[in-house]
Image (tube, helix red, strand yellow):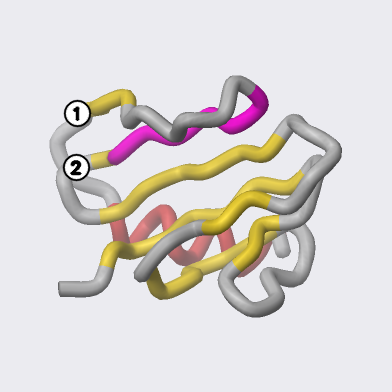
Amino acid sequence: LYRRALALRRELVAEEHLTWLETGDPDVLRFRRHDTWEVVTNFGSQPHALGDVDVLVASRPVVDGMLPSEATAWVSPRG
């Protein structure tokens, strides 16, 4: 996980810019980096739907587009 994340970070590095995104769930933190990829962290006890995204790396397996509890994923929105 760490090697994959470090390699991805080098690929995705750009001018530092961060945009907070509304999730509708107080247990989920989501922000966009560089207008191209997002970080989603689920602090809650229930899975959270990621929406129409490609998962770049995740701390726990994402199944059927659901980020499990106590997990973080880097995602790239489709389209």
Label 1 amino acid?
His
Picture residue at 14% right of the left edge, 36% below the top: 15
Query: 61 or 5, which is in the foreground?
Result: 61
- Where residue 45 sits, quadrant-wise, is top right
Q: Residues within 10 Å of mark 1 (few under 14, many from 20)?
A: few
Residue where numbered disc 2 is placed: 34
The magenta stretch is 27-32
Picture residue at 63% right of the left edge, 78% below the top: 64
Residue where numbered disc 1 is placed: 17
- Residue 2 lies, in percent from the top left, at 69, 57
In three-dimensional space, the C-alpha distance between marks 1 and 2, rounded to whole angstroms, equals 5 Å
Q: Is residue 51 magenta?
A: no
- Where residue 41 sits, quadrant-wise, is top right
Q: Residues within 10 Å of mark 2 (few under 14, many from 20)?
A: some
**Could you tell which of marks 1 and 2 lies nearer the N-terminus?**
1
Residue 15 placement, left or right of 30: left
Circle 2 — which element?
loop
Circle 1 — which element?
loop
- Residue 22 lies, in percent from the top left, at 36, 28
Label 2 amino acid?
His
Picture residue at 52% right of the left edge, 43% below the top: 40
Query: 70 or 12, which is in the foreground?
Result: 70
Q: Is residue 29 magenta?
A: yes
